[in-house]
Image (cartoon, rainbow, N blue to C red):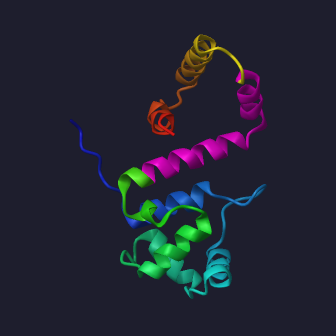
Amino acid sequence: MTEKKERTFAELLDYLFREVRPKGRGSFTYAEVAEGIRASSGVTISASGIQQLRTGKNSNPKFETVRALAGYFGVPPGYFFEEETAERTQATIQVVAAMRDQEVRRVALRANGLSTSSLRMVNEVIDHARRLEGMADDTGAAELLDDE
């Protein structure tokens, strides 16, 4: 059995910065996050403090900071402490990101209502296309979402 390496706080925060973005633009800035946290929770953290957490220069944030960051990015605080919660949360973020793509939405909407056997066939075609394009196997994320 292969043991999964638990990710650091910095790696988990970096993932949120890369994947959770305002609609139609790039990543949040450190200043935006700092101001958003202050406005929504009253917790004060500087932009440079957030940068230090993201880069790992500070690897021991206060719990109120963790809770405020989780709230800002819309994830449970357990995302930063429990590997299973982090995996499930990242799988959900991937689905949301994929659904922002109009072509992905079109495929999903067209697949709605198909029989189970037809959906399996569609998934096999998608898996084959991903392999042809050299894309990573996404079965891990799909399996995490299966028990919801």
Residue 93 magenta-highlighted: yes
Q: In the image, which residues are magenta? A: 86-111
Q: Nearer the viewer, residue 75 or 1?
A: 75
Up-down relation of residue 83 to residue 115 (above or below) = below
Residue 62: horizontal and vertical position, in percent? 41, 82
Residue 101: horizontal and vertical position, in percent? 74, 39
Residue 37: horizontal and vertical position, in percent? 62, 79
Tag count in the figure? 0
Q: Nearer the viewer, residue 113 or 62?
A: 113
Residue 37 magenta-highlighted: no
Q: Main secondary structure of the magenta part?
A: helix
At x 32%, y 55%, the residue is: 6
Up-down relation of residue 51 to residue 26 (above or below) = below
Q: Classify residue 110 as left or right of residue 62.
A: right
At x 60%, y 65%, the residue is: 73
Q: Nearer the viewer, residue 84 or 23?
A: 84
Up-down relation of residue 43 to residue 12 (above or below) = below
Q: Quadrant of residue 74?
A: bottom right
